[in-house]
């Protein structure tokens, strides 16, 4: 039992310490549902009070608002999903203060500015889709060391990002999807991306790369299901690893490059392959696929506009256009 003066001293101490404590916490991580409601208001204001966010108002539970999902037990926002909503302007800095955010989907809006480094503060982020917007400038060189380690999907397709692809992306070892296609990246495809051995989807198509070859390190991307490097200024032979080391491939798009040489015969043995597009290269040689081919699921082949590709493919269900040129 504390005596009178001692108790008074303890109380005084608490009064002195408590506000400082609260202030410190609020500055570091405002992660109460009430704070997060204020963040949503700030985001709405930053985007100019668009009509699509009219429901983000009033005294009700913000976890019931459209585009918002909260964790049931903590009441913290986990998902913000606003594809096709016409929201415009930069990614508001306040989004970085959602301490439990795992998924942000802003696909197909009018988001501009540069890559939002405020998202570095969302340590739990797993899924980030900023594709089909007006983002530009260079990706920060440290993106791969600063963004949440648990990121599994980074989808930046269809923007105006330029500069080189940061090699630090190779540090995001949980990535399953990396989509950087339809941007203005320059330089060549970094060898380091071959360290992302969990990748199932890798899209790099339609950038303004300098002439180069596919990195030898991609031999290690053995889990790829969807591999798109159309229009990437690639030259040299189609690497044998595409056929030999990527048994899960469902889509392979190597079109509109300067590949030479012949098609690795193992391609016809990729049992899961559905779509194969090799048009617009400089491939030569005879394609002879007779008898039962391994690629029983192949539904689309486009080998048009190559240099001197001849031969025949005997498989009635396959759509092959202009094989003989
Ligand atoms: C993008 O959003 C607009 C409306 O904002 C819609 O008309 C269009 O179909 C969307 N595009 C895609 C690819 O979903
Ligand atoms: C976000 O958190 C930072 C500190 O982590 C704080 O300084 C800032 O005021 C917060 N922003 C908003 C919009 O609440
Ligand atoms: C929330 O995001 C996670 C990925 O982080 C995803 O698996 C889940 O389906 C999303 N939930 C909703 C309701 O959109
Ligand atoms: C990352 O994922 C692991 C495994 O699911 C989980 O234990 C950890 O808490 C996550 N880290 C963050 C910062 O969310
Ligand atoms: C990169 O993008 C930024 C922002 O869109 C632009 O200002 C800059 O001129 C671009 N740089 C190059 C080399 O195209
Ligand atoms: C190839 O990419 C360039 C831009 O990098 C674009 O202008 C051109 O239309 C693309 N060509 C094809 C066939 O997609
Ligand atoms: C594939 O990964 C292994 C193990 O990390 C590494 O030793 C090897 O150099 C990589 N292969 C290529 C071609 O990069
Ligand atoms: C394709 O598979 C068949 C049957 O398993 C095998 O005989 C043939 O050598 C394989 N071809 C290549 C290029 O791997
Ligand atoms: C294709 O290769 C031939 C020689 O093999 C060469 O003359 C031609 O310029 C090449 N075309 C392209 C588009 O690379």
Image (spheres, grey):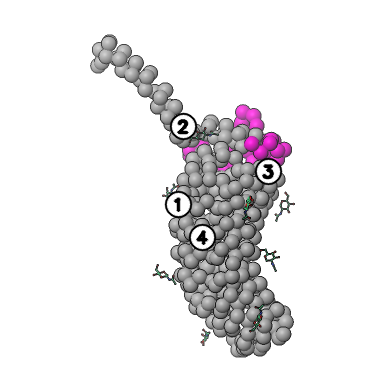
Q: Depth-wise, is mark 3 or mark 4 nearer the camera?
A: 3
Q: Quadrant of residue 262?
A: bottom right
| Number of numbered tags placed on the structure image | 4
The image position of residue 155, as x and y in percent, is 58, 56
Give the answer, above or below, for where 26 lies relative to 108.
above
Q: Secondary structure at mark 3?
A: strand
Kindly report the distance in space between the C-alpha atoms of the residues bearing marks 4 and 1. 17 Å
Kindly report the distance in space between the C-alpha atoms of the residues bearing marks 2 and 3. 28 Å
Q: Callout 2: few (<14), some (14-19), or many (20+) C-alpha neighbours within 10 Å? A: few
The residue where tag 4 is placed is: 176
Q: Nearer the viewer, residue 96 or 73?
A: 96
The quadrant of the image that shows the N terminus is top left
Q: Callout 3: few (<14), some (14-19), or many (20+) C-alpha neighbours within 10 Å? A: some
Marks 2/1 in contact by CB < 8 Å: the verdict is: no
Marks 1/3 in contact by CB < 8 Å: the verdict is: no
Q: Depth-wise, is mark 2 or mark 1 nearer the camera?
A: 1
Earlier sequence position, callout 2 versus callout 3: 2
Kindly report the distance in space between the C-alpha atoms of the residues bearing marks 2 and 4. 34 Å
Residue at point 65% right, 34% down?
Answer: 45
The residue where tag 2 is placed is: 27
The image position of residue 47, as x and y in percent, is 66, 38
Q: Residue furthest top?
A: 4
The residue where tag 1 is placed is: 145
What stretch of residues is rendered in magenta?
46-75
Marks 3/4 in contact by CB < 8 Å: the verdict is: no
Kindly report the distance in space between the C-alpha atoms of the residues bearing marks 1 and 3. 28 Å
Earlier sequence position, callout 1 versus callout 3: 3
Q: Is mark 2 within 8 Å of ligand 2?
A: yes
């Amino acid at each position: 039992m504390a005596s009178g003066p001692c108790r008074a001293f303890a109380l005084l101490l608490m009064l002195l310490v408590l506000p400082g404590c609260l202030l410190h916490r609020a500055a570091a991580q405002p992660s109460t549902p009430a704070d997060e409601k204020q963040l949503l208001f700030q985001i709405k204001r930053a985007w100019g009070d668009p009509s699509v966010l009219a429901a983000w108002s009033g005294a009700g539970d913000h976890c019931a608002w459209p585009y918002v999902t909260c964790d049931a037990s903590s009441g913290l926002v986990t998902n913000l999903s606003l594809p096709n909503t016409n929201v415009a302007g930069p990614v508001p800095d306040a989004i970085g203060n959602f301490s439990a955010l795992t998924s942000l989907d802003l696909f197909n809006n009018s988001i501009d500015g540069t890559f939002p480094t405020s998202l570095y503060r969302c340590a739990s982020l797993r899924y980030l889709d900023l594709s089909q917007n007006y983002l530009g400038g260079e990706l920060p060189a440290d993106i791969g060391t600063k963004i949440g380690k648990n990121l599994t999907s980074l989808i930046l397709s269809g923007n105006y990002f330029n500069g080189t692809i940061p090699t630090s992306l190779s540090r995001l070892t949980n990535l399953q999807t990396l989509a950087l296609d339809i941007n203005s990246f320059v330089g060549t495809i970094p060898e380091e991306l071959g360290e992302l051995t969990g990748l199932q989807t890798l899209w790099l198509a339609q950038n303004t790369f300098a002439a180069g070859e596919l990195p030898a390190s991609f031999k290690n991307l053995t889990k790829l299901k969807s591999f798109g490097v159309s229009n990437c200024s690639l030259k040299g032979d189609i690497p044998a690893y595409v056929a030999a080391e990527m048994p899960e491939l469902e889509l392979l798009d190597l079109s509109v490059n300067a590949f030479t040489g012949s098609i690795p015969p193992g391609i016809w043995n990729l049992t899961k392959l559905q779509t194969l597009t090799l048009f617009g290269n400089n491939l030569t040689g005879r394609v002879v696929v007779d008898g039962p081919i391994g690629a029983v699921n192949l539904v689309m082949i486009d080998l048009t506009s190559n240099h001197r590709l001849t031969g025949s493919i005997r498989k009635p269900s396959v759509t092959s256009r202009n094989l003989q040129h």
